[in-house]
Image (cartoon, grey):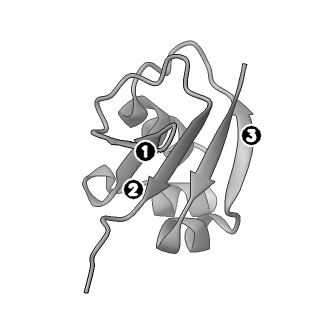
Amino acid sequence: MAVQLLYFAWVREAIGRDGESVELPETIVTAADLVDWLAARGGGYAQAFANPSRLRAAIDQSFVQLDAPVAGAREIALFPPVTGG
């Protein structure tokens, strides 16, 4: 099943797109696995996902830690930490 990936802020800028639909390999179990897989694509992906500690994730519009499982997810968003003011 395809998963919709959404990218925000400097993640989006580095990749050059705000989202995409992908078929996740069976080896991707967690959001951290997804980040590693995306970084391996090279180019802007490697730049955006080089430092996972600078990223946050949401699965189906719920904030999660990067060790959260992605099984059954329809949408996964990746973005920098949110600051308010």
Q: Which residue is mark 3?
A: 21
* Residue shown at the point (52%, 37%) measured from the top left: 60
In terms of depth relative to the viewer, which is nearer, 61 or 10?
61
Q: What number is the disc on residue 50?
A: 2
- Identified by mark 1, the residue type is Ala
Q: What is the CA distance from the residue labelled 3 to the residue labelled 1?
A: 16 Å
Distance of mark 3 from mark 2, alpha carbons? 21 Å
Q: Earlier in the sequence, mark 3 or mark 1?
A: 3
Q: What residue does disc 1 label? A: 58
What amino acid type is highlighted by mark number 2?
Ala
Image quadrant in which you'd find residue 82:
bottom left
Q: In terms of secondary structure, where does tag 2 sit?
A: loop
Q: Residue at x 57, y 58 (%)?
A: 7
Residue count near mark 3 (Cα–Cα under 10 Å), binned few <14, some 14–19, many ≥20: few
Q: Nearer the viewer, mark 3 or mark 1?
A: 1
Q: Given the image, on which type of amino acid does mark 3 rest?
A: Ser
